[in-house]
């Protein structure tokens, strides 16, 4: 059993939004993943995973410390952004992640070859280094690329050789970093698991792979 805290304290998308995330929630229920929305980050002891999905407000020092302590205690934190710093989401994400050598770029990833239905912003990739059990290809729509610095962070998913941003080739779309006994996962798009994309390719399997975790093992 996995217990997921879904943060809504920084104007994130709610998992209870039927139009966007009802399929994800149903899949989580089927897999015995219990999800509960939270308004405060002070008490995360009962949870295994914290999801921060499209935050519009920056995190203050108190929130960043709470997240850090959760990671040190073995928790997994999954933070998801969006392209072009829409609604200041990249700024909000980076207020947490830059201390770990991970930042969302203010850009967008595109691929004129490997995409879904001819839309270059609906990037499809098979370059998944982690959480790839039974996962061959995933769709990552409207994603920002990710900058890594230092020796600790590692790429989880990259674009194909044909993927581009305004500043780089084969961009990183998801990345991770070990923090204490826990792990931080940063994904460039919050809509890879919405009601449209989750049916595509192996998105649902990738979603379950990153969500299925217990820090009590």
Image: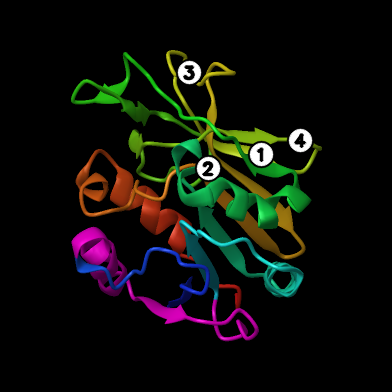
Q: Which mark is residue 149?
A: 4
User: Is residue 26 shown left or right of residue 13?
Assistant: left
Helix, strand or loop for disc 3: loop
| Mark 4 neighbour class, 10 Å CA radius: few under 14, some 14 to 19, many 20 or more | few
- Given the current orientation, which residue lies at the most extreme right position? 150
Quadrant location, the C terminus:
bottom right
- Residue bearing the label numbered 3: 164
Precedes in sequence: disc 2 or disc 3: 2
Alpha carbon distance from label 2 to label 3: 21 Å
User: Is residue 21 shown left or right of residue 182?
Assistant: left
Helix, strand or loop for disc 1: strand
Range shown magenta: 19-47
Residue 191, position in %: x, y?
34, 48
- Residue bearing the label numbered 1: 154
Helix, strand or loop for disc 2: loop
Up-down relation of residue 209 to residue 151 (above or below): below
């Amino acid at each position: 059993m996995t217990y997921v805290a879904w943060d809504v304290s920084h104007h994130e998308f709610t998992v209870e939004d039927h139009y966007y995330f009802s399929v994800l929630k149903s899949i989580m229920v089927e897999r015995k993943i219990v999800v509960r929305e939270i308004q405060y980050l002070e008490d995360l002891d009962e949870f295994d995973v914290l999801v921060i999905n499209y935050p519009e407000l920056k995190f203050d020092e108190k929130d960043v410390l709470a997240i850090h302590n959760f990671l040190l205690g073995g928790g997994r934190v999954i933070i998801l952004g969006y392209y072009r710093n829409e609604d200041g989401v990249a700024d909000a994400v980076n207020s947490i992640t830059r201390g770990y050598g991970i930042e969302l770029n203010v850009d967008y990833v595109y691929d004129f070859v490997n995409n879904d239905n001819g839309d270059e912003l609906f990037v499809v990739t098979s370059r998944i280094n982690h959480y790839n059990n039974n996962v061959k290809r995933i769709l990552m729509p409207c994603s920002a690329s990710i900058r890594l610095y230092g020796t600790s962070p590692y790429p989880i998913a990259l674009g194909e050789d044909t993927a581009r941003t305004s500043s780089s080739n084969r961009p990183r779309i998801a990345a991770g970093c070990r923090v204490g006994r826990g792990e931080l996962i940063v994904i460039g798009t919050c809509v890879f698991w919405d009601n449209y994309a989750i049916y595509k390719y192996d998105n649902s399997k990738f979603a379950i792979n990153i969500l299925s975790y217990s820090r009590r093992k």
